[in-house]
Structures are given as C-alpha cells and as structure tokens.
Image (cartoon, rainbow, N blue to C red):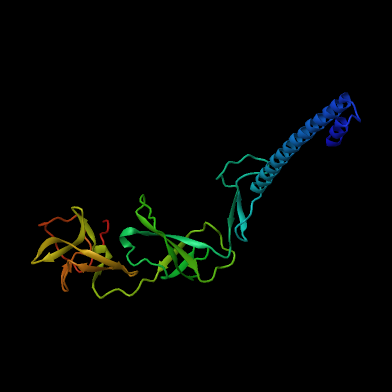
Amino acid sequence: MKRQQELARQNFISPAALEGRDQELQSADAAYQAAQANLQAAKQDTSRLQAERAAVALQKQNTKLVAPADAVVISRDAESGSTVVAGQPVLKLANPSSLWIKLRVDQGRSSGLEVGLPAQIVLRSRPQQTLKGKVERVELQADAVTEERIAQVAFDRIPSALSIGEMAEVTLGLKAAADALTVPQASVQTYQGRSGVWRVTDSKLEFVQVQWGAASLDGRVQAMEGLNAGDTVVVYNEKPLSVGASFRVVDALVKKTKP
C-alpha cells in the first residue's frame, strides 16, 4: 500500500487505482480480523472439549471399583446395570487373613478389659478345640442399649475353613488381681436397689452393701469393701429375705420328695 501511495504521489497511477488498492487492504484486514476471531473461537472450543473429555474420563473412573486389599467377595449388593447412589454398598469384601471376633462384655464386669489380654476362643463348630488369641482393640463407643463394652479379639493363628458370622465363646485371661475376700456368686443379692449380701450377725439378718471386684470361673467374686474375714453370709435362701426375718441355718439343703 505504501508503494501504491508513492506511485500515486508521482502520478504513475491514478487516484482511482489507489482507492481500489485501499479497499483491497481494508478487505484483507477484515478477513484477518475474522480469521483471528475464528481462531479464538476454535481455542475456546478446544478448551471446552478438553474439559468435557476430562469430565467423561473422571466419570468413567468413578465407575471402576478398586478393592483396597486382596479379599474375597462375600456379598454382592448390586447387579450389573442397576442404578446406585453415592455411599450405597455394591460389594462386601472380607480379608481371610485378618478376621476378628467381636466380643461383648457387660459394663459392670468389664474392669481390666484392655488391649493385649490373652484369650481362649471356642468356636461353635469346634466345641472340643480351644484356640488362642488376644484382645486386639477395645472400641471407644460402648453399646448404650445393651450396656456392653465391645472389644475385637484376634486369633494368634487363624484356623482353616473359618466361617464369617459364626458364634464363639471367648474367655479372657485378666491380670492377677489383688488379694481380697471372696464369696460364692450365689450369695450376691440385690436389696432396695443395692448390691450386697445378707450377713448373719448375733443370730440376726442384716443386708450389707458390698463393692465387688473380679469374678472367677469357679463361681466366686471378690468383695473389695463391706465384708470382713470371718463374716457369715447367706449363700442360698428359698424365699426373699428382709431385715429382721426369722431364719434357720442348715448344713445342706434337703431335697423334698412327694409322698
């Protein structure tokens, strides 16, 4: 265009020819601007398509189920092609090399329950076999409905052909308890909302509230406070007792027979 302007100044070309060249330049600029606009639109379309592609790839990734560890499928809660929502279980897995027993212990008798206690496990399917284990974890949350504490007991060696959900009886080996008086478990009574025993003093009955300790497998329980060595307590009574009630002490129960 500059050359054409110089030629027109020197009268080598007519003003009409110069005007025609100027119009060609403006048309070229307009075409260039249109091409630039199309280029920007194409870049935006590319960005949009890349975002859509990433979204589709993420959606595809969400449809892929990855197990957190090598395990066995024990339950399939959704079939192929069914619709599920976030948080809905699809498969339930179990790791056969890491199985625990959920142990429930009454809160009133859970003193001393802690991680590491040795355990003896008897499975319902193997009543003659005692397996060794230990307390692996004590749950922080107790069962407020059943008033029980929950612990997880692990096998020292997981037995073969173990069934998930099988009942088991667990006996814990507590740490050695402090020396204390013991009474038969059968003598423990509840009177007016208090736990204790009926004691015989000077041929009279009185109820003594007792603070209990650990209980043994042979049917005895520790009396931490409330009793003294040499006290006489009622082990069994046919009828409910009360303060001042008449009674008679026998060496052994007499079995009644029908005439």
Horizontally, is 66 left or right of 234 in the view? right
Residue 7 placed where, x, y %? 88, 33
Q: Residue 66 sits in which quadrant?
A: bottom right
Query: Is the C terminus in the top left, top right, bottom left or bottom right quadrant?
Result: bottom left
- On the question of residue 88 being in view, the answer is yes
Taking 216 as reference, is 84 above or below it?
above
Horizontally, is 229 left or right of 123 in the view? left
Taking 220 as reference, is 32 above or below it?
above
Q: Please identify the residue farthest to the right as the structure is shown.
A: 12
Q: Please identify the residue farthest to the front as the structure is shown.
A: 10
Numbered-mark total: 0
Q: Please identify the residue farthest to the top as the structure is shown.
A: 16
Residue 205 placed where, x, y %? 12, 61
Q: Nearer the viewer, residue 52 or 34?
A: 34
Identify the residue at horizontal 17%, vertical 56% (top origin).
241
Taking 89 as reference, is 194 above or below it?
below
Identify the residue at horizontal 86%, vertical 36% (top origin).
3
Q: Residue 173 sits in which quadrant?
A: bottom left
Residue 219 placed where, x, y %? 31, 67
- On the question of residue 238 being in view, the answer is no
Query: Is the N terminus in the top left, top right, bottom left or bottom right quadrant?
Result: top right
Horizontally, is 123 left or right of 20 in the view? left
Q: Please identify the residue farthest to the left as the structure is shown.
A: 202
Identify the residue at horizontal 74%, vertical 34% (top origin).
37
Q: Nearer the viewer, residue 253 or 155?
A: 155
Q: Nearer the viewer, residue 253 or 168?
A: 168
Residue 158 placed where, x, y %? 55, 68
